[in-house]
Amino acid sequence: MRERLTTSLKEAMRAGDKPRLSTIRLIQAALKDKDIEARGAGKEQTSEDEILSLLQKLIKQRQESAKIYAENGRTELAEQENAEAAIIASFLPAQLDEAEVAAAIEAAIAETGAEGIKDMGRVIALLKERFAGRLDFAKASGLVKTRLSQG
């Protein structure tokens, strides 16, 4: 992932693609902060799964900002935030479709032996371990909760 970001940065520089260039620099700055944080905690550099989670967090931030801008009539800023989110999303692996999400949730519930809402944390932890960057955990969390409350 780090090599892909560096390569994309160079390509954006050569192409003079300023929006893509600034967004990749933003990703790299966030990644550097995460690496520094990991070193402070005595860990090695940020793992691939942590990078994918970081990218999802950055996308979510952009989407929330775009929504606020749109609500306040600042369409040009909303469009800029949405464009940044799309650029960041281009670095994520393909997202699971609805059927794959449902199957993953069922498998995680079966594997953890989850029987109710109190077991939700174990199910989500297993999903995060296996599907980091490929699953919207905000949506998955709601689906898991619904499924576990059905018994």
Image (cartoon, rainbow, N blue to C red):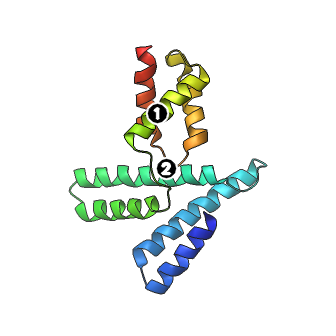
Q: Position of residue 114 (x, y in %)?
A: 56, 19
User: Do tag 1 and tag 2 residues touch (Cβ < 8 Å)?
Assistant: no
In the image, what residue occupies the spot 33% across and 65% down? 80
Label 2 belongs to which residue?
A: 57
Q: Amino acid at mark 1?
A: Ala
Decide if residue 47 is on the left or right side of residue 95: right
Q: Earlier in the sequence, mark 1 or mark 2?
A: 2
Choose top left, top right, bottom left or bottom right for residue 145: top left
Q: Please tell me which residue lies in front, 16 or 41.
A: 16
Label 1 belongs to which residue?
A: 103
Q: CA distance from mark 1 to mark 2?
A: 24 Å
Decide if residue 61 is on the left or right side of residue 77: right
Outermost residue on the left side: it is 73
Q: Residues within 10 Å of mark 1 (few under 14, many from 20)?
A: few
- Residue mark closest to the camera, 1 vs 2: 1
Circle 2: element type: helix
